[in-house]
Image (cartoon, rainbow, N blue to C red):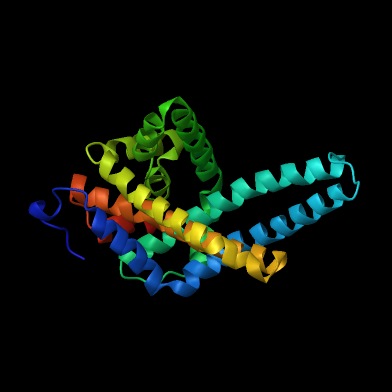
Amino acid sequence: MASVTLDQRDRFRIGRVLGDSFAVIGRNPAVCLGLGLIFYAVPNFAFSIWFWKSVTLMEHGTPEFSAQRVTLSAIGAVGYVVLLSFLQSALMRVAIEDLNGKRPLIRDCIGTAFAFLLPAIGISLLVGLGVLFGFVLLVVPGLLLLGRWFVAVPALIQERVGVFGSLRRSRDLTAGSRWSVIAVWLVVFAATLAINFSLKRLTFSFGAPIGFFLSAVLAAAEFVVGSILPAVSYVELRRVKEGASVDELAEIFS
């Protein structure tokens, strides 16, 4: 894929990022949804069932706080962060391979996720805490920090510059395009809220277990979209800022 010309890379295009993100998933449904089901939906469903049964036992006189419940909750919280970071990295690998015209393989994507697991967790925690603090202040600072660090994990995976180097790289790439980046996130976030609101009652109309399962599958699909989006945004920002083609971006994996 040849490098784009200057007049084609003058700005970050929201429509192209959204279109390319869904196109990546559409070309690789088995890989994307398979990863989402294995590393998100199944653990989410298992934890939801355990929590539901735990609440039911509490209603029948079981102590609200027990050493076992606290321990399992702590393990679940840590595992949740690890799995999300792992899955996000694997899906970003899917995106860059697809945009390079290659066929993403689950084994390769999992290997990449393992290689970058610890720094990806570090970035996720730093970004999460920073954005949360920004939202607590006045919402807008949180959005700005989200836009500033939106492509930190793709930068980590593609350029291997470490945790803080990836945050700086994301800051530089998003400079001048942050409101467009934020707009991309807001569009997907609003669509997610609308889908969840409209389907929540339907998913649980079949009973709690089936409802938890359908909710977990829906959440996994939403997470897949949310993970592909930063990778596609990273490629778009590289085009806008540096005129880099997807071929050039993928050379780091050769």
Please name the residue shown 49% across and 70% down the image: 31
Q: Residue furthest top?
A: 137
Q: Residue furthest left?
A: 7
- Residue 90 in view, yes or no: no
Quadrant location of the C terminus?
A: bottom left
Q: Residue 101 falls in which quadrant of the image? A: bottom left
Say whether residue 129 is left or right of residue 65: left
34 up-or-down from 112: above or below: below
Say whether residue 184 is left or right of residue 84: left
205 up-or-down from 193: above or below: below
Please name the residue shown 75% across and 55% down the image: 52
Please name the residue shown 30% across and 46% down the image: 183
Residue situated in front as seen by the camera: 214 or 147: 214
9 up-or-down from 35: above or below: above
Q: Position of residue 85 (x, y in %)?
A: 54, 49
Q: Residue 78 falls in which quadrant of the image? A: top right
Quadrant location of the N terminus?
A: bottom left
Q: Position of residue 12 (x, y in %)?
A: 21, 49
Say whether residue 235 is left or right of residue 80: left
Residue situated in front as seen by the camera: 58 or 135: 58
- Residue 164 in view, yes or no: yes
Disc tally is 0
Please name the residue shown 38% across and 34% down the image: 145
Q: Residue 44 falls in which quadrant of the image? A: bottom right
Residue situated in front as seen by the camera: 21 or 179: 179
Q: Position of residue 116 (x, y in %)?
A: 51, 49
